[in-house]
Amino acid sequence: MGMFTELVMAAQIKDDPEVISILEFMLDNNSTIEDNRGGWDVNNLPDHPLFSTPRWECMLTADSPWFPGKSNSELRFEPNYYDGYNYYLSIRCNIKDYDLELELFLDWLSPYIVPEGFMGYLMYEDSKYPELIFITEEHKLEILDIENEFTNNKEDSENG
């Protein structure tokens, strides 16, 4: 059984029409996959494990009373006078992460994030510390479990 898990992140997203359309769909609580408002082919979703999970459509707007505050996710765009638009994704959501939907979402999105660096955190319901989310120069997802880092560093200093 999964734990309630909170995702808090902010990132600039590459101007990829399919990715932007899917994100817009995932953030629209009033649409259904049958609406196909994003312009992508619902019968030809990206070949990624995220899209075989049962709750991928609603996960970015999910909320529970487990974490303080209210979930709020949005995709905004601003004109870029050089080459179109800059897209900015901000997410604060939490779900019972049964199928690791949050981690799969981050894995799917990581190639489309610019620039690399710190992006946010995942926080599990029974954890004392969050896991920090980074995107590497190669656009790969890296999650740093700082609880283990603190424990290992504390043990090293005590033994050392």
Image (cartoon, rainbow, N blue to C red):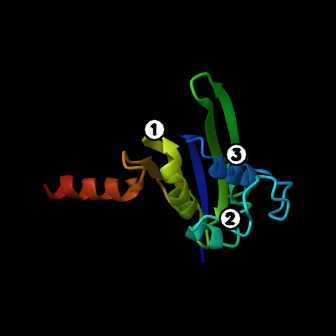
Q: Residue at x 65, y 72 (%)?
A: 53
Question: Relative to the observer, which residue lies in front, 9 or 115?
Answer: 115
Instruction: Examine the image and state in which quarter residue 31 appears.
Output: bottom right
Q: Quadrant of the C terminus?
A: bottom left
- Which numbered dot is residue 56? 2
Question: Residues at badges 1 and 2 in contact (C-beta under 8 Å)?
Answer: no
Front position among marks 1 and 3 = 1
Residue at (48% x, 51% y) in the render? 111
Structural crowding at the residue carrying mark 3, measured as other residues with C-alpha within 10 Å and reported as few (<14), some (14–19) or many (≥20): many
The residue under label 1 is which amino acid type? Answer: Pro
Residue 122 versus residue 126 in the image, above or below: above
Q: Is residue 98 left or right of residue 58?
A: left
Q: Position of residue 129 (x, y in %)?
A: 46, 53
- Which secondary structure, mark 2? loop
Q: Residues within 10 Å of mark 1 (few under 14, many from 20)?
A: some
Which residue is located at x 73 percent, y 49 percent? 24
